[in-house]
Image: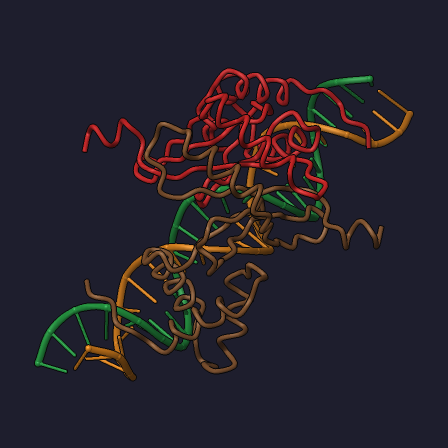
Chain colours: A red, B brown, C green, D orange
Amino acid sequence: MQIRNTKQRSKILEILHGTRSHPTANWIYDKVKVDFPNISMGTVYRNLGLLEEMGQIQRLSCGSTFDRYDANIEPHIHFACKNCGRVSDINDLNSIGKLKEAISTIDLQINSYDLTCYGVCKDCQNNH
Amino acid sequence: MQIRNTKQRSKILEILHGTRSHPTANWIYDKVKVDFPNISMGTVYRNLGLLEEMGQIQRLSCGSTFDRYDANIEPHIHFACKNCGRVSDINDLNSIGKLKEAISTIDLQINSYDLTCYGVCKDCQNNH
DNA sequence: CTAACTGCAAACGTTTTGCATTAAT
DNA sequence: ATTAATGCAAAACGTTTGCAGTTAG
């Protein structure tokens, strides 16, 4: 089954590349609708699935009842706020280095991995 | 709201302590039914939620569409097989040490974290 | 006696699917 | 011309919830 390029899929990938917010399918759906008012959720989900299979994006759960999507496929660490639900990247090179070491020590064929940390983000701590 | 002890909840926790399979709510439901034939899924989910809030168990997603539950709350690493779906623990002390270092380097208040690795388990590799 | 917990069933939100039509190659 | 991808709507799935009755404290 050969994969064809479609405007819808390109737009979805473009949207994902243009954000750091680890959006949900619904958020993406709303954004694509600006250019493709008739697009359906089915198409969004099918394309997110395809892009994931192609290794161009990552699917995240982050403890929520719904999935999030991330076009950043470099090794990095996720932080999910238990209060506001936002998911952000931890790009601390030191931690990422240690994480890579932890993974390379494991005697199993590991194709991908995800480290998600849970806590209360600084914004939520300040606004008490 | 004070929490009361119930036979159903104790049984659920006992079942979780007696397995290393990171079971789903449905698997747990089937097991509890042996002793409580009339128990409902609602009760199972409510108790799993309570036990999680009480910090006695952990909820895992592991890339699946459903949740898994784990009574092992010590820091450890999960391995999810992309082929058979099984989730197992990686108890390599070296990796866990590195992981702890990675976490402690991060300048954020982290209450919990989960490292899940994805690949094909040895069983699935052998049975080609 | 009080109110937390239960079993039941219905509802929920997210994701997947079947199908007829459209569009990419 | 072929068949992958689309839009639509309905279904599926895991999980949550409202309620009347039960049980732990």
Looking at the picture, how far across and down is residue B118, in whole percent?
Answer: 64, 42
Looking at the picture, how far across and down is residue B29, in whole percent?
Answer: 50, 70
Q: Which image quadrant for residue C22?
A: top right
At a point 63% along the width and 30% down the height, the residue shown is A47
Q: Compared to B99, does B66 lie above or below?
A: below
- B2 on left or right of A75: left
At a point 20% along the width and 65% down the height, the residue shown is B2
Q: Compared to B15, does A74 lie above or below?
A: above
At a point 41% along the width and 34% down the height, the residue shown is B104
- B74 on left or right of A125: right
Looking at the picture, how far across and down is residue A31, in whole percent?
Answer: 47, 21
Q: Compared to B9, does B59 lie above or below?
A: above
Looking at the picture, how far across and down is residue B64, in whole percent?
Answer: 58, 48
Q: Quadrant of the N terminus of chain B?
A: bottom left
Closer to the camera in the image, A66 or A63? A63
- The total of numbered circles placed on residues is 0
Q: Which image quadrant for residue B73?
A: bottom left
Q: Compared to D23, does A29 lie above or below?
A: above
